[in-house]
Image: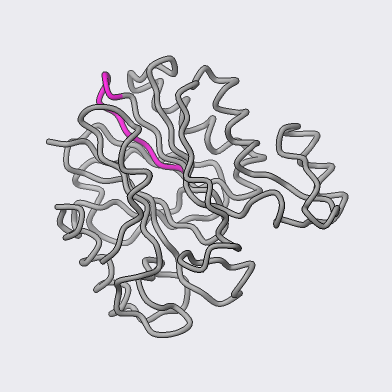
Amino acid sequence: MQLSPAPVAGLGDGVRAVFTDRHGGVSQPPFESLNLGAGAGDSAQCVAANRELLAAACGLRPADIAWMRQVHGTDVRYVGREHCDGPAQPADASFTDVPGVAVAVLAADCLPVLLADPVARIVGAAHAGREGMLAGVVPALVSAMRSAGADPARMRAITGPGICGGCYEVPAEMRDRAAAAVPASSCATRAGQPGIDIRAGVHAQLAALGVTRVAADSRCTKESAELFSHRRDSRTGRFAGLAWLVP
C-alpha cells in the first residue's frame, strides 16, 4: 500500500498522522483501488480488506481505527477504545486521548482536517465539506478538545487534500452565503466564476480560534489523479486521514 508521505510529520511529538491515496488496495473500478469508504457503493468485502491493509501499514489493528458515518454536520464524538467496534456512528468530527486509537476521516473533495495537542495528548479529526465548514465543524472540534484539556495555543493542525478554490465552482448565491458566514472562503475560480475555497475558510477559522501552527497537504483532489474526487469522477471511492497517539 502506498501512503502519501508529506503529512506524516507536523502534529508534534508522540503523534502520528497519514493521508492515504487511491493506490495499493483491492477494489475494482470505479473504486480502484484503496477505497476506504463503506458508503461509496463498493463491496463491503473490498472495503474491509482495504481497511485491514491501511491498519497494517500504520502498525495498527483494524479495531484500533474509529470511523465515522459522515453526514455533513457539526456533531463531535469522543472515541474510547470501546467505541471502535461496531457500526460507525453519525458524526463529522471525533477526538481521543487513548494511545493507539486512531481517529479517521474520509474524503473525496471535502477537506479532511487533523488536530493534535501533543502536550495534553489529544488528537482529533474533522470532515469539513462546504456545509460543515460553514456550520463550523472545525471550531466545534477545537471546542470539544479544549473542554477535554487541550489548549488552542498548543494545538497543531494539518489540512489534507481537498478540492481547491480554483476548481470549486458554485452558483453565485451559494458563494455569497459562504462569504457571509466565512468571508475567507469566498473566491473566484480559474475560469472567473463564483467559487468557494474550503481550505482558506478552515484556515481562517483555526486562526480565529488561536490555532496558528497549521500545515497543509495542498493537493487539489479534482486535479490529482492519485486521489479520489467526486466532482471529477462522480462515482468513486474515498481516501482517509488518520491521527493517533503513540502508546
Please name whichever residue, 241 or 23, is drawn nearer the observer in this view of the structure: 23
Q: Is residue 132 left or right of residue 167?
A: left
Image mark count: 0
Image quarter of the N terminus: bottom left
Percent across and percent down for residue 181 are 74, 34
Q: Quadrant of residue 87?
A: bottom left
- Kindly identify the residue that appears in the image at 26 percent across and 46 percent down: 102
Is 94 positioned to the left or the right of 40 in the image?
left
- State the colouring used for the structure image: one colour
x%, y% of residue 36? 36, 66
Left/right placement of residue 150 relative to residue 135 reads left
**Most distant residue in the left direction:** 247
Looking at the image, residue 53 lies above or below residue 114 = below
Residue 204 position in % (x across, y down): 62, 28
Residue plotted at (25% across, 40% down)? 16
Q: Is residue 171 left or right of residue 124?
A: right
Q: Of all residues shown, which one is farthest toward the bottom?
A: 28
Identify the residue at horizontal 45%, vertical 48% (top origin): 91
Quadrant containing the C terminus is top left
Query: On the image, which quarter does residue 124 sit in?
Result: top left
Image x and y of residue 228, in percent: 50, 67
Q: Please determine whether, in this image, residue 61 is positioned above or below residue 229.
A: above
| Highlighted magenta segment, given as a residue range | 118-126
Report if residue 58 lies within the magenta region.
no
- Is 120 a magenta residue? yes
Q: Looking at the image, is 199 positioned above or below residue 42?
A: above
Residue at 29%, 51% (x, y): give it.
66
Q: 66 or 201, which is in the foreground?
A: 201
Q: Is residue 35 above or below residue 153?
A: below
